[in-house]
Image (cartoon, helix red, strand yellow):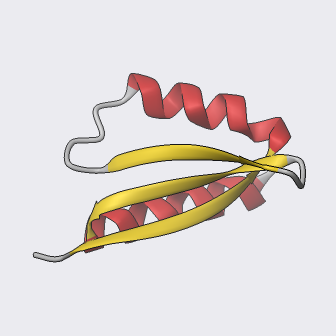
Amino acid sequence: MSDATYVAFVPAKKCDRLREMLQTEDTGPLEWKERRAFSGGSEFYFSGPSALARRAHAYVTEWVIAD
């Protein structure tokens, strides 16, 4: 199984909520890190098995646009 990294931009108003979720959940082999962007938000990097990283990216992307 190959690893992949996906990046999702999260607006500042949702960063705290996502960070809290990721810190409290067991993400298993999925690793994440946050890099604050100058444009009023953060880039969240999801790395791990490609299928899992892709699903995490898709979930976060849909979650960001849901509100």
Residue 66 makes an appearance in the image: yes
In the drawing, does residue 57 fall left or right of residue 67? left
In the drawing, does residue 11 fall left or right of residue 7? right
In the drawing, does residue 27 fall left or right of residue 22? left
Residue 58 makes an appearance in the image: no
Question: Which percent across, then down, holds residue 6?
Answer: 47, 69
Q: Specify the quadrant of the image occupied by residue 43.
A: bottom right
Residue placed at 82% from the left, 41% from the top?
A: 12
Residue placed at 89% from the left, 55% from the top?
A: 39
Question: Which percent across, then down, holds residue 52?
Answer: 29, 63
Total marks in image: 0
Question: Which percent across, then down, holds residue 53?
Answer: 36, 64
Residue placed at 43% from the left, 57% from the top?
A: 46
Front residue of 67 and 54 = 54
Front residue of 35 and 2 = 35
Question: Which percent across, then down, holds residue 29?
Answer: 20, 49
**Position of the N terminus by quadrant:** bottom left
Residue placed at 66% from the left, 30% from the top?
A: 17
Residue farthest along the bottom direction in this orientation? 2
Front residue of 61 and 2 = 2
Residue 52's place in the image compared with 14, above or below, is below
Residue 16's place in the image compared with 39, above or below, is above
Residue 23's place in the image compared with 18, above or below, is above
Residue farthest along the right direction in this orientation? 39
